[in-house]
Amino acid sequence: MSRWMLVGITALGTFAAYATGFGLKPGLWEVRIVKQVVDGRDTTAQLAGASDKLQQAMANMPPEQRARLEAMLKQRGGAQGSNGGFRICVTPEMAQRDKPIVDKEGRCQPATASRNGNQTTYEFHCSNNGVTTSGKGTAVASGDLITTHVDMTTHHPDGTTRVMQHDSEMKFLGSDCGDVKPPNMPK
């Protein structure tokens, strides 16, 4: 599996972590991938290795090149965090949403979402550029931590099917996002 496919899968599962209208506060959050399984194969270590390589590559860059890359990440709504995670800025509008955000471009809207106490469950089905993705997820809020589990299946135009499971955590770091810009979310 290509590194970019893993990044895409990770992004889809991670942005499902916004699955709240509860527990998500405006401010700076750190997102960390806890586990990722693709087609029955645990790719968590591979993903962590890619993150470690990126951190190492950034550390070895000339300061001006590293600053440009960090600025680009921040402009796209993220910044490198600790433990292979990344940081995102959540706006008050994002925190008030009452439905899960499955992808940050807003192309994949949940078909259903229900809340029971501190747990939100949801299902989604979407299509983009001939790729169809469907799945279900659960997000649980506990204080300043939101954990998410997503099961999804992706069908590609060439007939390839991928079955994925993704677990992530979002930890609230504080109300000040500093220089991390929020992602461009749909209204």
Image: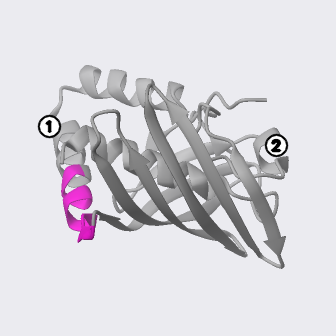
Q: State the image coordinates of residue 134 (x, y, percent, origin top left).
A: 53, 51
Q: Is residue 91 above or below residue 43?
A: above
The image quarter in which residue 46 lies: bottom left
Q: Is residue 82 left or right of residue 172?
A: left
Reading the image, the residue beneath label 2 is 92
Tell me the crowding category of disc 2: few under 14, some 14 to 19, or many 20 or more residues within 10 angstroms, Cα based: few
Q: Is residue 51 above or below residue 57?
A: below
Numbered tag placed on residue 60 in the rendering:
1
Residue situated in front as seen by the camera: 111 or 19:
111
Residue type, mark 2 in image: Pro
User: Of helix, strand and loop, which one carries label 1?
Assistant: helix
Q: Residue at x 41, y 66 (%)?
A: 165
Q: State the image coordinates of residue 98 (x, y, percent, origin top left).
A: 84, 52
Q: Is residue 3 left or right of residue 114?
A: left
User: Of helix, strand and loop, which one carries label 2?
Assistant: helix
Q: Residue at x 48, y 40 (%)?
A: 132
Residue 43 in magenta stretch: yes
Q: Residue at x 26, y 51 (%)?
A: 51
Q: State the image coordinates of residue 125 (x, y, percent, origin top left).
A: 60, 47
Q: Is residue 167 above or below residue 52?
A: below
Q: Nearer the viewer, mark 1 or mark 2?
A: 2
Quadrant (top left, top right, bottom left, bottom right) of the C terminus: top right
Q: Residue at x 21, y 54 (%)?
A: 52
- The part of the chain drawn in magenta is 40-50
Q: Is residue 144 above or below residue 130?
A: below
